[in-house]
Amino acid sequence: MSGIRQFSLLFFCASFNSVVNAQQLVVEHIANAGVKISSGDRTVLIDALFGPHQRFNSLNEKAFSELIEQGAQVVMTSHYHSDHFAGKRARQYLRANEETMFIAPPQVLDYLSDLGNLPFLKGPQLTDFQSTKFSHKGVDITVLNFPHMSPEQTADVQNYAYIVKINGWKILHIGDGGINPTIIDGLNLADRNIDLALLHDLCPEQEDCVERIKQIGAKQVAFYHMTDDRTEPVGSWITENYPAARMLVTGQQPVLMSKE
Ligand SMILES: [Zn+2]
């Protein structure tokens, strides 16, 4: 009996070690543009506090409650559009996780004025190609003003991109930013040594998507903001144009990266 128990314990330890690699980067899809980025014992969320939504996938109540319980060191929102942010869910999350740092454009913080006494709410005002930095519980965040796509309809929407530095990894998430050469250059993305660039699925709709990915210069790229019916066309685009790219969409495995 004790022999069996010992064996099970050894087996458990062995499999646990092979699954949890302290160096590994794990990026899980939450829904739409929402991602959970983890490495070592650190976790951050971007664009995950939203829903329910009529057009785009979002977490159901139970899954959102689990996300609240799991917690994170830092949570970020790119902009206030309803497929990226919902005031009710953000309040729910932040009331339950008061030690979590929350970073978003001031327009997002306006929806959370009743949380004003929480210690770690950050809404830096950025324009042009400005950026700023925050550090919290071992995670470093660079916040970049990254104008929203199709600026003629959304010129007044503040959209921020984030570069997350977690356990030695650097991950870029651009929210609904317009993927164009002027912005990529203006924000010096090529000089920032990005390991993984997370981009929305309108990049593959652009003729110059591959050039823009190369201009960003990240080691790996993954697309988000996909409804389920986008899996096939974006998957075909990837196969034909940029086979190394990954998708963050319902039913796909997390994006994993390991140090060589
Ligand atoms: Zn948007």
Image (tube, rainbow, N blue to C red):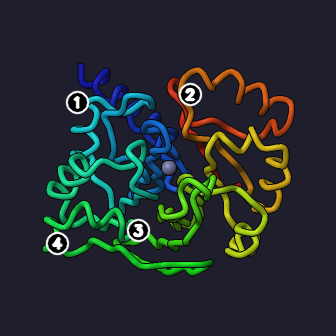
Relative to 61, 126 lies left or right: right
Residue type, label 2: Gln
Q: Is residue 22 above or below residue 130?
A: above
Mark 2 lies on a secondary structure that is loop
Q: Where is residue 23 in the image (x, y as percent from the top left)?
A: 55, 56
Q: Tell me what residue is drawn at x 64 percent, y 40 percent.
A: 201
Q: How far apart are marks 2 and 1 (CA)?
A: 20 Å
Q: In this view, does 31 lie above or below 198?
A: above
Q: How far apart are marks 3 and 2 (CA)?
A: 30 Å
N-term-proximal mark, 3 vs 2: 3
Q: Tell me what residue is drawn at x 62 percent, y 54 percent.
A: 149
Residues packed near mark 2 inside 10 Å, few (<14), some (14 to 19) or many (20 plus): few
Q: How far apart are marks 1 and 3 (CA)?
A: 28 Å
Where does label 4 land, which residue? 116
Q: The N terminus lies in which quarter of the figure? A: top left
Residues packed near mark 1 inside 10 Å, few (<14), some (14 to 19) or many (20 plus): few
Q: Which of marks 2 and 4 is in front?
A: 4
Mark 4 lies on a secondary structure that is loop
Q: Where is residue 11 in the image (x, y as percent from the top left)?
A: 42, 30
Q: Nearer the viewer, mark 3 or mark 2?
A: 3
N-term-proximal mark, 4 vs 3: 3
Residue type, label 1: Lys
Residue type, label 3: Pro
Q: Marks 2 and 1: CB-CB under 8 Å?
A: no
Where does label 1 land, which residue? 62
N-term-proximal mark, 2 vs 4: 4
Does the Cβ of the disc 1 residue fall within 8 Å of ligand 1?
Answer: no
Q: In the rendering, which numbered label is found on residue 105?
A: 3
Relative to 199, 17 lies left or right: left
